[in-house]
């Protein structure tokens, strides 16, 4: 098991935003975390990442207890985070944005799957032509690619991606989907929050559906297909 | 040389040198408050403390150069300790917590200074090589003022190079716009902020040593120069090094020519300048946020 989150309870002040939330991700797997707005999907990711501290529960990553660790320790343990708001650095150039993702320390160069600046440029050719441009000047879709590229520069073992296709044109949605598929192929596991069901279903091996602050349903894509009740309860508006 | 021109030049040099000292003090403040968003009202107190440390090092060793090296470093280390063990704990509670804490720290430092060194003003001698004047183009320039201007420019250039040409500078600029995101990319942001805080207080320390021979060393240094530095940060725009430099020079010159031409008005000239700028540009000349 790569990631194992058990019985997480997270609060925003007095509001109980996660109630005994549990999920896990196997090595090489794509797991989708789905549900309507405000159910706690982003909160789950932030809690795993260490941006929010759970009051109780455990997060084990690669056999190590990382519960409540500072985000940079979680990142160094091997989890990459692509937040919903993208949060590129607007005042930094495209190249500097990518370099911000480099974590320092040892990089296993013998691994052919390692992400380097050259490979990022190969995957996202537009960045090579605009290395000196400020991040703020990129379009929404390009900013999304930049956020993903930035996180890949840190060579995570697990990528947590929050709403990557939100607000993007259909062409860009497909591009993002293909990028995520390629990332998974390179051996990185993915935990994906995504409103576009088609995209989520085409990528994921398994799904978790969230009701208000808690886990509602979990199973493989086939199991979800065979369970219209769960779909009606947690997904359809 | 025409004595009137000579006086203008001398006043100009005084103004420039004072402006550069203000810049050193204010740029530390703009790094800490403007960029990192940490309110530190003890900043000018560190400046005063460093002037005393300078006096003490000279008393022990007789060397101004050793004082210039040691006093700012000790000041910077005290700054780092303040950030690491006190400020960091109250940062989550917003500016009020920082305000109360740093006012308290500055009172403790001020009273300790009085206990150790008394309240009288203590003289600091300029080393021999920096005394006297150099003559160029028929005009005399005081060497010590030239030295302060040169030293401040070197510090400014090094700071700019670090901020815009190194990975550390890139991390600082990114962390200023989104600290949590930088942390989530695997960079120890609290460590980086502690370092920046240390550099900021170190600069206040350099300014304290630079001012000691000019104004002598006394407990009221913090109030007298600290207020001017705060005006520089506000008028220049929070977080803007270029703005701090420009406004510090303007304030230095206003100060010294003010004394010469409108001595009755001189003490309030900087406030008038601040008021006029803020009416038209509420965020300061180069400020991006309030």
Image (cartoon, coloured by chain):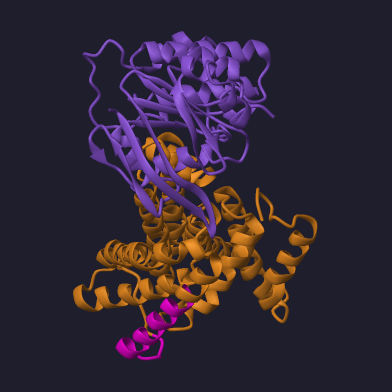
Say if the magenta span includes residue B55. no
Q: Nearer the viewer, residue A82 or A184?
A: A184
Say if the magenta span includes residue B117. yes
| Chain letter corresponding to the colour orange | B
Question: Could you say where residue B269 lies in the image, as x and y percent from the top left?
Answer: 71, 71
| In this rendering, position of residue A23 left or right of residue B40 | left
| In this rendering, position of residue B154 left or right of residue B67 | right
Residue occupying the point 44% across, 60% down? B148
Q: Nearer the viewer, residue A210 or B230?
A: A210
| Chain letter corresponding to the colour purple | A
Q: Nearer the viewer, residue B200 or A107?
A: A107
> In this rendering, does residue A106 appear at all?
yes
Residue A228, picture quadrant: top right
Question: Could you say where residue A114 lies in the image, as x and y percent from the top left?
Answer: 31, 16
The stretch of residues the image draws in magenta is B102-121
Question: Could you say where residue A64 lies in the image, as x and y percent from the top left?
Answer: 24, 39
Residue occupying the point 43% across, 50% down? A9
Q: Main secondary structure of the magenta part?
A: helix
Looking at the image, is B35 positioned above or below residue A124? below
Residue occupying the point 39% across, 82% down? B108
Question: Could you say where residue A13 lies in the image, as x and y percent from the top left?
Answer: 53, 59
Residue occupying the point 66% across, 77% down? B267
Location of the N terminus of chain B by quadrant is bottom right
Looking at the image, is B22 positioned above or below residue A166? below
């Amino acid at each position: 098991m790569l990631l194992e989150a058990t019985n997480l309870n997270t609060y925003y002040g007095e509001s109980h935003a996660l109630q005994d939330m549990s999920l896990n991700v196997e090595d090489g797997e794509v797991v989708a975390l789905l549900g309507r707005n405000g159910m706690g999907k982003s909160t789950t990711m932030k809690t795993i990442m260490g941006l929010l501290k759970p009051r109780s529960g455990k997060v084990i990553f690669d056999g190590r207890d990382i519960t409540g660790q500072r985000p940079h320790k979680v990142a160094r343990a091997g989890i990459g985070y692509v937040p919903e708001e993208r949060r590129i650095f607007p005042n930094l150039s495209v190249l500097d944005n990518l370099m911000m993702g480099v974590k320092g320390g040892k990089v296993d160069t013998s691994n052919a799957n390692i992400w380097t600046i050259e490979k990022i440029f190969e995957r996202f050719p537009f960045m090579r032509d605009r290395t000196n441009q400020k991040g703020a000047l990129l379009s929404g879709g390009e900013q999304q690619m930049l956020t993903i590229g930035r996180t890949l520069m840190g060579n995570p073992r697990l990528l947590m991606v929050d709403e990557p296709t939100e607000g993007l044109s259909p062409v860009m949605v497909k591009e993002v989907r293909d990028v995520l598929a390629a990332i998974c192929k390179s051996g990185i596991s993915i935990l994906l929050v995504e409103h576009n069901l088609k995209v989520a279903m085409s990528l994921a091996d398994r799904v978790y559906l969230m009701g208000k602050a808690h886990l509602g349903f979990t199973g493989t894509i086939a199991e979800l297909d065979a369970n219209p009740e769960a779909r009606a309860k947690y997904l359809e508006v | 040389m025409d004595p009137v021109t000579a006086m203008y030049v001398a006043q100009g040099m005084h103004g420039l040198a004072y402006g550069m000292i203000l810049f050193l003090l204010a740029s530390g403040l703009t790094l800490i408050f403007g960029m990192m968003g940490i309110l530190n009202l003890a900043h000018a107190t560190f400046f005063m403390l460093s002037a005393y440390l300078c006096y003490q090092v000279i008393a022990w060793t007789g060397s101004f150069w050793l004082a210039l090296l040691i006093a700012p470093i000790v000041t910077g280390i005290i700054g780092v300790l303040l950030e690491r063990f006190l400020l960091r704990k109250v940062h989550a509670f917003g500016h009020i917590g920082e305000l109360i804490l740093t006012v308290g720290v500055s009172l403790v430092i001020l009273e300790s200074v009085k206990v150790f060194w008394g309240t009288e003003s203590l003289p600091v001698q300029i080393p021999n090589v920096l005394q006297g004047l150099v003559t160029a183009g028929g005009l005399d320039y005081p060497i010590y003022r030239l030295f302060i201007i040169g030293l401040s420019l070197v510090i400014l250039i090094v700071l700019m190079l670090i901020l815009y040409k190194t990975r550390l500078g890139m991390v600082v600029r990114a962390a200023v716009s989104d600290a949590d995101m930088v942390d989530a990319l695997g960079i120890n942001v609290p460590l980086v902020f502690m370092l920046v805080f240390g550099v900021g207080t170190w600069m206040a320390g350099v300014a304290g040593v630079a001012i000691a021979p000019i104004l002598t060393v006394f407990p009221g240094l913090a109030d007298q120069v600290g207020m001017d530095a705060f005006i520089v940060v506000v008028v220049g725009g929070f977080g803007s090094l270029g703005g701090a430099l420009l406004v510090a020079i303007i304030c230095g010159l206003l100060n010294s020519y003010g004394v010469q031409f409108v001595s009755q008005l001189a003490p309030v000239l900087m406030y008038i300048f601040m008021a006029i700028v803020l009416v038209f540009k509420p965020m300061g000349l180069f400020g991006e946020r309030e």
